[in-house]
Image (cartoon, grey):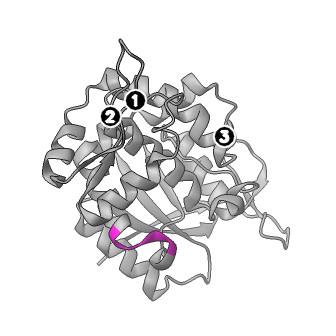
Amino acid sequence: MASTDVIHLTKTFNKSKKCWIDPQTGKETAIEGAVSGYFRQRGFHVPYNEAIGKQIGGDSGFYWCILNSCLLAVMFENYDHRNPLHKNVFEDIFTGLRLRRFAMPSVRNPVTGKVTEMARIDDHEAAVAGAAQRSVDDIERNLKAIVPKYLSKYKVPRTCFGEDLTPSRMVKSILPVFESLGLEMLLALQVYRSEKNFAVEGRGWPDLAVWNSKDFAFVEVKGPNDRLQAHQRARLEEINALGISAYTLNVKSA
């Protein structure tokens, strides 16, 4: 059974959805924005921006852009956005996860400059083991190459963590994922998502992902008189079964 927690936040008399006060900024916002501010005040990184969310698949689209960037960062020894084989490789990797076969581009020959054709690695376990051996330096270098290109593709703003961040500072906000969630759980989560076929069975993903260097959790936000739906409960329970924290946060008016 997915767990539940309760917090109290300030609510205004505004009858629109933006009737909650973000405790970090003091501004009126949607309930998910207020909860994001609540966690940010407590040292968590929370990708959320209510103005852009619907353009990238709702609120969960933000954290999936981040987690997909993390996946790309571990699947390459040296990601190069100028390499044509690396340009749209995420779809190949994601398909590989679902089929237990990773489509991986080979490295450009530093002497000849020649790029060989896409090589397919059929041994899923070997591919996962290779990703899990990536060093923090390799991951950070890859993220610095991936984040500006990948996030701009989906119009994720530099303010998605609550403040205007340069790409380098945004990478610093993402790196704690690898400490709190870890490589093994990141891969397990992405395999689970690929098996669910996100486009078809993607309903019920929690509203927010929050993390710092010690903790990572998915949070389904519910306001007064808002009940957890069956498909949302099922998603929380399945994520918890992976060994990743996922719970309902009931928000009450202070």
Q: Is residue 50 toward the left or the right of residue 63 in the image?
A: right
Residue where numbered disc 3 is placed: 152
* Earlier residue among tags 2 and 1: 2
**At label 2, which amino acid type do we have?**
Ser
Q: CA distance from mark 3 to mark 1?
A: 26 Å
* Earlier residue among tags 2 and 3: 2
Indicate the secondary structure of the residue bearing disc 2. loop
Front tag of 2 and 1: 1
Is residue 197 found inside the magenta-colored segment of the image? Answer: yes
Q: Give the image quarter of residue 21.
A: bottom right
Report x, y in % for residue 52: 73, 54
Q: CA distance from mark 2 to mark 1?
A: 7 Å
Residue at the spot x=64%, y=25% of the render?
A: 166
Q: Which quadrant holds the N terminus?
A: bottom left
Residue 208 visible in the current orientation: yes
Residue where numbered disc 2 is placed: 106
What's drawn in magenta, residue-wise?
A: 195-199
Report x, y in % for residue 226: 59, 81
**At label 1, which amino acid type do we have?**
Val
Q: CA distance from mark 2 to mark 3?
A: 25 Å
Is residue 87 found inside the magenta-colored segment of the image? Answer: no
Name the residue nearer the viewer: 30 or 103.
Answer: 103
Residue where numbered disc 1 is placed: 115
Q: Is residue 223 above or below residue 152?
A: below
Indicate the secondary structure of the residue bearing disc 1. loop
Name the residue nearer the viewer: 48 or 226.
Answer: 48
